[in-house]
Image: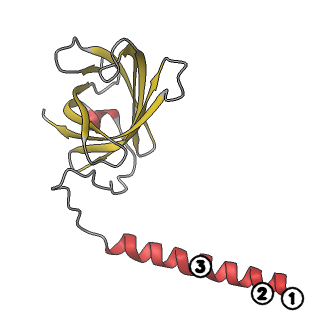
Amino acid sequence: MRLFTFACCCAAVLVIGCRKSENRASTATTTDTSAGAVAPAAATGTASLAAVAGKWKVRAMTEAGDSTLLTYELNATSSGSGSTITFPNRQPMAAHIAASGDSIIIDAGPYASVLRPGVQVRMHSVGLLHANQLVGIGAWHYETNRPDSVLHFQMAGTRTQ
């Protein structure tokens, strides 16, 4: 009998919890990004490389989104091939851009790290397009034997062209 009661309670909590999530999602209509926080992206359907094609000014921020770690320019092509990332005072480097479902996936590297001089790094990020912004998360994978070989970040890109 206790097992039945426990199962019923769990089911009730699950149903109520899901119902509250749906209500919150359907009533949220505005987002404040004035303080630099990354706006939660709305479901955009299917992403395409053509939609992300162009030049973007991208900020990579801490996981909490409270400070900018670095900026770069993303030049995305409509086919994904020939896309580049350019850090300030550096030459453009190749970036691989793909679309999958509602997400834009960006990979680059290995390249000389901007944040950790003398260390090679690979970047992997996943973002969503929302009202001429590209917002998402990513990770830098450092080629090192140290325990802190991965650094996670938030990204926020604004189309410039």
Going 35% across and 38% down the picture, which residue do you hit? 48
Q: Residues within 10 Å of mark 3 (few under 14, many from 20)?
A: few
Give the residue type at disc 3.
Answer: Val
Which residue occupies the extreme left position in the image? Answer: 161
Q: Secondary structure at mark 1?
A: loop
Q: Position of residue 27 (x, y in %)?
A: 32, 75
What is the C-alpha distance between the residues marked 2 and 1? 6 Å
- What number of labels is visible? 3
Which is nearer the N-term, disc 2 or disc 3? 2
Q: Nearer the viewer, mark 2 or mark 3?
A: 2
2 and 3 marks in contact (CB < 8 Å):
no
Q: Quadrant of the N terminus?
A: bottom right
What is the C-alpha distance between the residues marked 2 and 3? 15 Å
Residue assigned mark 3: 15
Q: Position of residue 154 (x, y in %)?
A: 34, 42
Q: Quadrant of residue 8?
A: bottom right
Q: Position of residue 113 (x, y in %)?
A: 34, 18
Colour treatment of the image: secondary structure
Residue assigned mark 1: 1
Which residue occupies the extreme right position in the image? Answer: 1
